Amino acid sequence: MLELRIEGRSFGQPVLGEIFTTIRQGDRICLLGPSGIGKTTLLNAIAGLDHSLSAKAVPNRDKARVGYLFQEHRLLPWRTLRQNLAIVGADAADIDRVLDSVGLAGYADHLPDQLSLGMARRAALARCLVIQPDLLLLDEPFASLDPVRATELKHLILELLDRHPAMAMICVTHDAGDATDLANRLWYLDGQPACLQWDAPVGSPGTVEGVVQTLRNLDQVG
């Protein structure tokens, strides 16, 4: 579906090094790595938000629909949920259907500030889904949520992925448990500049925790 051919870049100090890989339909990728290593930078590169990168870094990106759930919900506070989704081209029927699919039926005419953090994140997820994305990017979707709300959102994302098996996902997380629950493929970003130190399918239960702990130990030794 998408190829990454990132040849390295710099913000005065290198952030991303060489990253060559392919994102395929149905991939459920969890992206882990140390704090500040460049995971969000990589998502921004994939989404086309980093204009310092050559167009050749992600060829044919313009042929893929990308939905991006940022760390902040980024809903326009002066517009209702219905209006926020209409901005991306959704019609009334699609808005009601997608809000219902994320558990927000009946909230279409609420403003973002009238919602809890968990509900606002669901609304932002609905905005991603209403464009019927080929690739869904999630940047720490469970951050700042209490354990109950985080678990509810994780189950919702799993249900949505099961309903749309061709849709690919890349989810940034610090929690290997999230990857165990969500991923069929694991990326681990580390190094200076940052490269994918691990890019492989998830095997049997317990694989993710073992791989991540090994990579973290190697980083500490290094």
Image (cartoon, rainbow, N blue to C red):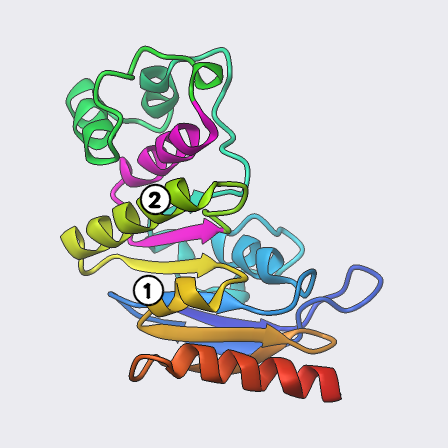
Image spot of residue 177 (x, y percent) = 42, 66
Would residue 154 appear left or right of 55 to someone viewing this image?
left
For the point 19% across and 23% down, the residue is 96
Is 137 in the magenta? yes
Quadrant housing residue 124: top left
What residue appears at the point 52 percent right and 30 percent down from the top-left corner? Answer: 74
Q: Residue 132 versus residue 185: which sits nearer the camera?
A: 185
- Based on the displayed image, in which of its 4 quarters is residue 116 positioned? top left
Mark positioned earlier in the residue sequence (2 or 1) = 2
**215 is within the stretch colored magenta:** no
Front position in the image: 96 or 57: 96
**Secondary structure found at label 2:** helix
Secondary element under disc 1, as helix, strand or loop, is: helix
Please say if 71 is above or below 216.
above
Asked if residue 41 lies left or right of residue 157, the reply is: right
Residue nearest the observer in this picture, 108 or 193: 108
Q: Quadrant of residue 111?
A: top left
Q: Which mark is residue 181?
A: 1
Taking the spot 47% from the left edge, 25% from the top edge, the residue there is 75
- Which residue is tagged 2? 153
Would you say 58 lies left or right of 107 here? right
> In the image, which residues are magenta?
116-139
Q: Quadrant of the N terminus?
A: bottom left
Which quarter of the rendered picture does the C terminus lie within?
Answer: bottom right
How many marks can you see?
Answer: 2
| Mark 2, other Cα within 10 Å: few <14 / some 14–19 / many ≥20 | many
As measured in the structure, the alpha-carbon distance from the residue carrying label 2 to the one carrying label 1 is 12 Å
